[in-house]
Image: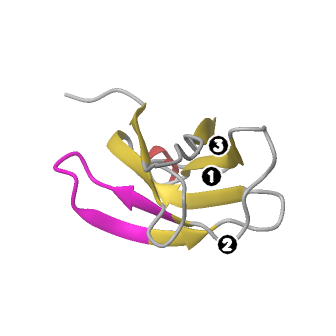
């Protein structure tokens, strides 16, 4: 039996904290999480589903990567999130990253 190469997908998460609003209340939901998905040879992976999960790992939103491998989730409040790259139907392995935005009490 021939061994197939181990195709890994790499998840790069960039947290962008933006607060362009005048009031503190409206600034609470101005955080964003964005990143890029690359394959094992550091090439961007397009049309891969990326999930945003809450602190209990429940699905909040879905996005698909663009041709550049870029995804973005905007309008987020401070808290703990998980970003998971779904690789169903591909030779890639799933990736998940924990992210904390702002201070949590």
Q: In which quarter of the image is residue 55?
A: top left
Which dot, 3 or 1, sits closer to the camera? Answer: 3
Q: How crowded is mark 1: few (under 14 residues within 10 Å), some or many (20 or more)?
A: few
**Mark 2 or 3, nearer chain start:** 3
Q: Which residue is drawn at 57% across and 60% down?
A: 74
Q: Mark 2 points at which residue?
A: 47
Which dot, 1 or 2, sits closer to the camera? Answer: 2
Which dot, 2 or 3, sits closer to the camera? Answer: 2
Q: Residue 99 carries which label?
A: none
Seen from the viewer's position, the closer of residues 3 and 26 is: 3
Q: What residue range appears in magenta?
A: 50-61
Q: Which mark is residue 18?
A: 3
Q: What element carries label 2?
A: loop
Q: Which colour scheme is used?
A: secondary structure
Q: How many marks?
A: 3
Q: Name the residue under label 1.
A: 21
Residue 52 lies in the magenta stretch: yes
Indicate whether 93 appears above or below 67: above
Q: Position of residue 18 (x, y in %)?
A: 64, 43
Relative side of 68 to 91, left or right: right
Quarter of the picture containing the C terminus is top left
Q: Distance between the residues labelled 1 and 2?
A: 32 Å
Q: Which residue is drawn at 74% across and 56% down?
A: 69
Q: Position of residue 19 (x, y in %)?
A: 62, 44
Q: Quadrant of residue 14?
A: top right
Q: Do the residues labelled 3 and 1 touch (CB within 8 Å)?
A: no
Relative side of 80 to 55, left or right: right
């Amino acid at each position: 039996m021939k061994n197939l190469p181990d195709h890994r997908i790499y998840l790069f998460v960039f947290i962008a904290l933006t607060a362009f609003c005048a009031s503190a209340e409206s600034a609470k939901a101005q955080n964003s999480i964005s990143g890029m998905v690359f394959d094992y040879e550091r090439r961007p992976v397009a049309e891969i589903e990326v999930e945003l999960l809450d602190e209990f790992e429940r699905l909040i939103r879905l996005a698909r990567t663009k041709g550049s491998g870029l995804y973005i989730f905007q309008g987020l409040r401070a808290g703990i999130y998980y970003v998971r790259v779904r690789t169903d139907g591909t030779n890639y392995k799933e990736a998940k990253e924990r992210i904390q935005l702002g201070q949590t009490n």
